[in-house]
Image (cartoon, rainbow, N blue to C red):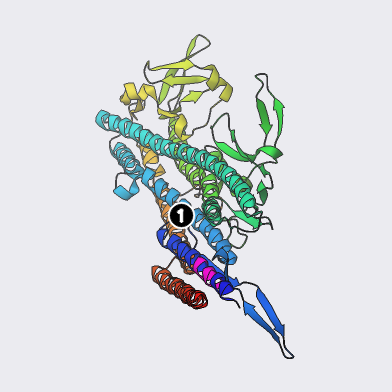
């Protein structure tokens, strides 16, 4: 090879070493950058010049080294495993957080929960059984009953408020998912445009896209694949999300009664145009999540933080009626953390109220007015059994706490709220004004110890008491029922905590294995830097030697 050609070979070494040093410096500068993937320099031989053909082999001279490309060092199988385990970990972590919040709402962790008001109410009724005609004890019973109702409604309202909080989180998460989809689509376009010539790799853009896929993997169950042009297609819950030139947006359908949002595929939902020109969607066959599916790791249905929030929130405010049909309960209620607790808690309140009211009604005698209150029906005064608890809203009438009057309300009439449910209860206003109306003193002058004892016995008996839910056989009195409810919450919380911890360990192991491949090691990069620096120096020294040889030849020939 000529000396001039040798200079070209040396220059290729300089250029390649400089580019390799730049890549190493890029790795070092992104040592702690989230989502960055280590970039590896690939070098290759330039073409060989054939200078002669020998009998055995050709005589060739190389033209130096070429900086072929910089590749991302990733393992696609570890990426898929990481995103799957990230989604599963987020599902159980979110579920554990929801269960912990329910425990906080009930307040039993701090010793000032609903159980205190239930026990105090029971003690006041026990005292009434001892001295049924004591006006002080009668007033205490009414006071404890009011505290019982207030605390019960505070617990149930707390569960409802938490449902609303989860609802807002679902809305925020869905908006974020749509935003991620748009960003992935835009990154697809940029990557394809940059890599179309086959010269440059858009590694930093690929890092940004991979980071978005990592984020999506924690929020929802995703599948994805990359085509030969560099486009990544993404599916969520088996449905196309980013595909080709389309981002399939997820919409939010708001329930008119609860305000709960249901994610649905806008492109799949049928709609009609309302009078105001807005689209009214029918999302029945376009829902993103199947809320009747069984949650199972074997079926890979326990993936995604958004799904966990959907199941925890449920789709309505549950009450005791949701426990009366086993098929309905197992299909719609049992897998929802909040709805399940709402229904079981409401069943306790309903049972206490109807049992005590029933005992008083059974002892009442309208002919003498014993345990009755005077009401006016069709312009005439009549007597009806007095109730310790009343429905706050009955056939359109609602008791106004401010005016102390029953008021007709058309909206309530349309809803026809007639259940003895937690949020539809008040203590009888007549008894609140005059607790002595509860006096168990018969018109014949005898003290009604039998009814007083029955009221006290109602808190102790296990007969005709409901179990927590249709899948539980154990029954108990009011206190035992509530203890079972608390134990169920605690046990479920521990199960979610253990699974979440196990998934966290699995995720950390997968993340560590992935980091060994994609992560930047400062020691390794410093070693590479020294190697490429020495290669650069060697090429520089090689060029200097060729330059000296050329200078010697020129000077010699000149003389």
222 sits left or right of 153 in the view: right
What is the residue that sits farthest to the right in this orientation?
55
Residue 475 location (% of width, % of height): 48, 52
Query: Can residue 519 be seen in this snapshot?
Result: no
Residue lying at 46% horizontally and 16% vertically, measured from the top left: 407
Position of residue 243 relative to residue 528, above or below, is above
87 sits left or right of 524 in the view: right
Which sits in the foreground, 144 or 499?
499
User: Dot 1, how many residues are within 10 Å of its Cα: few (below 14), some (14-19), or many (20+)?
Assistant: many
Q: Mainly helix, strand or loop, the magenta region? A: helix
Query: Can residue 346 be seen in this snapshot?
Result: yes
Residue lying at 41% horizontally and 59% vertically, measured from the top left: 29
What is the residue that sits farthest to the bottom in this orientation?
56
Helix, strand or loop under label 1: helix
What is the residue that sits farthest to the front in this orientation?
559
Which sits in the foreground, 526 or 303?
526
Q: Magenta region: which residues?
A: 9-15
Q: Quadrant of the N terminus?
A: bottom right
Position of residue 555 relative to residue 433, above or below, is below
Residue 271 location (% of width, % of height): 71, 31
Position of residue 174 relative to residue 484, above or below, is above
127 sits left or right of 457 in the view: left
Residue 342 location (% of width, % of height): 48, 42
Q: Is residue 426 magenta?
A: no
Residue 298 location (% of width, % of height): 61, 63
Which sits in the foreground, 18 or 518?
18
Residue lying at 65% horizontally and 52% vertically, measured from the top left: 231
What is the residue that sits farthest to the top in this orientation?
379
Which sits in the foreground, 332 or 229?
229
Which residue carries the number 1 mark? 93
């Amino acid at each position: 090879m000529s000396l001039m050609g040798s200079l070209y070979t040396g220059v290729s070494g300089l250029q390649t070493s400089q580019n390799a040093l730049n890549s190493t410096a890029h790795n070092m500068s992104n040592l702690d950058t989230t989502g960055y993937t280590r970039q590896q320099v690939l070098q290759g031989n330039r073409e060989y010049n054939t200078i002669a053909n020998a009998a055995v082999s050709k005589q060739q001279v190389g033209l130096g080294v070429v900086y072929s490309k910089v590749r991302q060092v990733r393992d696609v199988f570890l990426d898929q495993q990481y995103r799957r385990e990230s989604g599963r970990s987020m599902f159980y972590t979110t579920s554990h957080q929801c269960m912990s919040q329910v425990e906080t709402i009930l307040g039993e962790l701090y010793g000032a929960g609903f159980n205190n008001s239930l026990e105090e109410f029971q003690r006041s009724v026990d005292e009434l059984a001892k001295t049924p005609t004591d006006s002080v004890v009668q007033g205490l019973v009414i006071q404890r009953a009011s505290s019982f109702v207030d605390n019960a409604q505070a617990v149930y309202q707390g569960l409802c408020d938490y449902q609303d909080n989860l609802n807002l989180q679902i809305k925020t998460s869905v908006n974020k998912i749509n935003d991620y989809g748009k960003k992935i689509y835009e990154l697809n376009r940029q990557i394809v445009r940059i890599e179309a010539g086959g010269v440059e790799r858009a590694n930093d853009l690929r890092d940004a896209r991979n980071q978005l896929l990592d984020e999506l993997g924690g929020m929802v169950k995703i599948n994805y694949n990359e085509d030969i042009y560099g486009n990544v297609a993404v599916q969520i819950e088996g449905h196309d999300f980013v595909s080709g030139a389309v981002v399939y947006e997820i919409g939010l359908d708001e329930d008119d009664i609860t305000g709960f949002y249901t994610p649905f595929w806008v492109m799949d939902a049928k709609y009609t145009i309302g009078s105001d020109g807005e689209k009214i969607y029918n999302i029945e066959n376009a829902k993103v999540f199947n809320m009747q599916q069984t949650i199972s790791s074997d079926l890979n249905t326990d993936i995604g933080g958004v799904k966990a929030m959907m199941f925890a929130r449920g789709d309505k405010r549950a009450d005791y009626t949701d426990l009366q049909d086993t098929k309905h309960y197992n299909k719609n209620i049992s897998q929802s953390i909040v709805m399940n607790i709402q229904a079981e808690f409401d069943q306790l309140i309903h049972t206490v109220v109807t049992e005590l009211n029933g005992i008083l009604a059974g002892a009442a005698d309208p002919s003498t007015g014993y345990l009755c209150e005077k009401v006016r029906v069709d312009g005439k005064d009549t007597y009806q059994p007095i109730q310790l608890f009343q429905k706050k809203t009955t056939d359109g009438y609602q008791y106004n706490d401010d005016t102390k009057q029953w008021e007709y309300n058309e909206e309530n009439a349309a809803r026809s709220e007639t259940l003895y449910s937690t949020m539809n209860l008040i203590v009888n206003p007549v008894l609140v004004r005059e607790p002595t109306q509860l006096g168990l003193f018969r018109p014949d002058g005898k003290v009604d110890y039998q009814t007083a004892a029955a009221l006290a016995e109602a808190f102790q008996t296990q007969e005709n008491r409901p179990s927590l839910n249709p899948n539980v056989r154990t029954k108990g009195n009011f206190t035992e029922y509530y203890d079972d409810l608390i134990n169920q919450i605690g046990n479920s919380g521990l199960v979610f905590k253990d699974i979440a911890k196990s998934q966290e360990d699995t995720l950390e192991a997968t993340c560590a294995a992935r980091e060994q491949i994609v992560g930047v090691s400062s020691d390794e990069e410093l070693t590479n830097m020294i190697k490429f620096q020495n290669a650069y120096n060697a090429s520089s020294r090689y060029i200097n030697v060729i330059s000296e040889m050329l200078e010697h030849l020129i000077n010699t020939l000149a003389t």
